[in-house]
Image (cartoon, grey):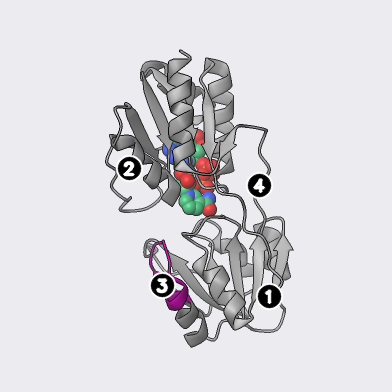
């Protein structure tokens, strides 16, 4: 009887470390999006489950007693699948998710609902744009080819991208304010495009944009069905202790 941790965030890694220091039996799961995923101190599997049906099978086969959804707030498909599979198998589910960042008086945000709206929000006149949104949706920005794009991604792409003007920084979080400030200033960035991830791992670019008085195009989180959410790995451990003793 073990706990399944759906990972892909800094908090998921923190949770895995915390769990490894207890007697709990747990398994970590990665989608397999990056070439070299961060190593975890608990047994790890990589790759999709095969939709809701695949996750249901996995839960039953591996005798999973609880699922912790510690995926990124924008990994909505995985979160929806977890809700459905846990409901079908009557498995307790808890999401570990930081609250979204909130705009401060000295921020200059344009709040948008999704990637398409983020592209719409970019100006028509050429500008220097920082895309800190991962690599999945970069092609959405091809329809505004007039800009110079600075892309920060975890892995070097397999081939050239279809932007006339772009530069890649290969790096992975957590990021630091000073470094991000220097990067944005040195590259003469005018707009930062960000997903509202919350937490501190990706916050440096938001702080840096605030400091440099840059516009941030902030993409809001996708909506999810109602579920139990905590913000701190410690609360997950408490919840697990209770859900175990309740069994
Ligand atoms: P997604 O659209 O919600 O998921 C697409 C499919 O990928 C899921 O249906 C599932 O495949 C598989 N998958 C996702 N997370 C998985 C996990 N932890 N373990 C096993 N399979 C998983 O997710 P995404 O936006 O592609 O993100 C993929 C992963 O990258 C997530 O784990 C997430 O935490 C991490 N990540 C995402 C973002 C982002 O902005 N989206 C940012 C940072 C990190 P099956 O249907 O076959 O099970």
In the picture as drawn, the residue positioned furthest to the top comes out as: 247
Residue located beneath label 4 in the image: 222
Q: Is residue 65 left or right of residue 77?
A: left
Q: Residue at x 58, y 79 (%)?
A: 211
Q: Magenta segment range?
A: 167-180
Residue under circle 3? 169
Q: Secondary structure at mark 1?
A: loop
| For residue 237, above or below residue 91 | below
Position in image of residue 162 (x %, y %): 52, 70
Determine if the magenta segment contains residue 175. Answer: yes
Q: Position of residue 2 (x, y in %)?
A: 36, 23
Say whether disc 1 or disc 3 marks the residue closer to the N-terminus.
1
Cα separation, mark 3 vs mark 4, equals 27 Å
Q: Is mark 4 within 8 Å of ligand 1?
A: no
Q: Which mark is residue 106?
A: 1
Separation of residues labelled 1 and 2 (CA atoms): 36 Å
Label drawn at residue 17: 2
Discs 3, 4 touching: Cβ within 8 Å: no
């Amino acid at each position: 009887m073990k706990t399944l941790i759906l990972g892909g965030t800094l908090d998921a890694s923190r949770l895995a470390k915390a769990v490894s220091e207890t007697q709990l039996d747990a398994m970590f799961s990665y989608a397999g999006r990056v070439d070299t995923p961060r190593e975890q101190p608990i047994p790890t599997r990589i790759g999709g489950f095969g939709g809701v049906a695949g996750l249901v099978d996995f839960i039953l086969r591996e005798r999973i007693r609880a699922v912790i959804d510690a995926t990124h707030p924008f990994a909505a498909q995985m979160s929806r699948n977890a809700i459905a599979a846990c409901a079908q198998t009557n498995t307790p589910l808890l999401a570990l998710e930081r609250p979204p960042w909130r705009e401060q008086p000295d921020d200059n945000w344009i709040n948008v609902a999704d990637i398409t709206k983020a592209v719409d929000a970019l100006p028509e006149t050429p500008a220097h744009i920082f895309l800190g949104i991962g690599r999945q949706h970069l092609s959405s920005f091809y329809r505004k080819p007039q800009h110079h794009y600075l892309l920060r991604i975890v892995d070097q792409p397999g081939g050239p991208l279809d932007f006339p003007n772009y530069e890649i920084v290969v790096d992975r979080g957590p990021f630091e304010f000073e470094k991000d400030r220097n990067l944005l200033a040195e590259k003469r960035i005018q707009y930062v495009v960000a997903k509202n991830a919350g937490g501190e791992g990706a916050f440096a670019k938001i702080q840096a944009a605030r400091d440099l008085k840059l516009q941030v195009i902030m993409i809001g989180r996708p909506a999810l069905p109602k579920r139990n959410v905590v913000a701190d790995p410690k609360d997950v451990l408490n919840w697990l202790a209770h859900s175990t003793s309740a069994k």
